Amino acid sequence: MPTVEGTPIWFELNATDQDAAQAFYEAVAGWHVAPSPMPEHGGYRIAEADGTPVAGIRGSIPGAPGLPGWAIYLATGDVDALASRVVELGGQVPFGPVDIPHVGRFAMARDPQGVMFAMMTPARPGESRAFGPVPLGTERTLGHGVWIELATPDPEAAIAFYGALFGWEKLGAMPMGGMGEYAFIGRGDLRPGAVMPSAATGAPARWNWYVHVADIDVAVATVRERGGTVLQGPDPIPGGSHSATVADPAGNRLGLAGPRRAA
């Protein structure tokens, strides 16, 4: 079954120290991380949750595509056509499209507000299970991405841009007082995340993603024990779970979402 346009299909960390990143995220997210079995991937490491690939960790290479920290890959049926559309809409494509052996064809893009994201046409559409936006009370998505979130200086312009690319629409919003609104985005059954103002909230202009953890309090305690920082939360979210924004010891930001077992 073809993947719906705009579905998050991969998450990738550009790490200055792969060993340190692997140890931190295995402890916090419960992943098993191992080198890719394909030599042509050049030491790329694959993070798995229950045997399912969900994310990658690669070493920083001067001049290589990517950005500091985590990148979100959004699916498209034709990455070359979408790259051209990005430019038409006022964005930039600083790298690609290029092929990744056995994986697909991808490009790194920058939206008109300067926020980076990746887009990919997978070699085998429909196979990715990195993202699973199902109720957090289920066990199927432990260690998987369950939400994406864009902080941007111009939410309305961003929603228009990504809507033109992926058909997303604004599907309601949650008022945040003087910080503006938290606008939900999606298309049909795909409701991947939300958009919020970066200036009013003080959040860096960037895409963030949230990984499902078994116990939010245990996860944030592990972040601190392993040298990371808890930037916000845990805060209650609809459905009875909690979320937190954290940074690993190198300063890379990530969201966590899960239940408060002790409550």
Image: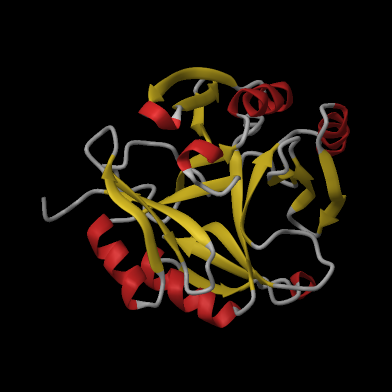
Q: Residue at x 33, y 55 (%)?
A: 213
- Give percent across and percent down for residue 35: 62, 75
Left/right placement of residue 208 relative to residue 137 reads right
Does residue 114 appear in the picture of this structure? yes
Left/right placement of residue 193 relative to residue 10 reads left
Does residue 30 appear in the picture of this structure? no
Q: Classify the position of the N terminus by image quarter.
A: top right
Give the mark count: 0
Left/right placement of residue 27 relative to residue 74 reads left
Q: Compared with residue 262, is residue 76 higher up or lower down, i.e. above or below?
A: above
- Give percent across and percent down for residue 260: 19, 51
Q: Nearer the viewer, residue 61 or 54?
A: 61
- Give percent across and percent down for residue 183: 48, 25
Q: Nearer the viewer, residue 151 or 255?
A: 151
Q: Compared with residue 89, is residue 218 higher up or lower down, i.e. above or below?
A: below
- Give percent across and percent down for residue 235: 28, 45
Coloring scheme used: secondary structure
Which quadrant of the structure image shows residue 53? bottom right
Q: Residue furthest left?
A: 263
Q: Nearer the viewer, residue 101 or 89?
A: 89
Q: Residue at x 59, y 28 (%)?
A: 155
Q: Nearer the viewer, residue 38 or 239?
A: 239
Q: Residue at x 63, y 30 (%)?
A: 154
Which quadrant of the structure image shows residue 239? top left
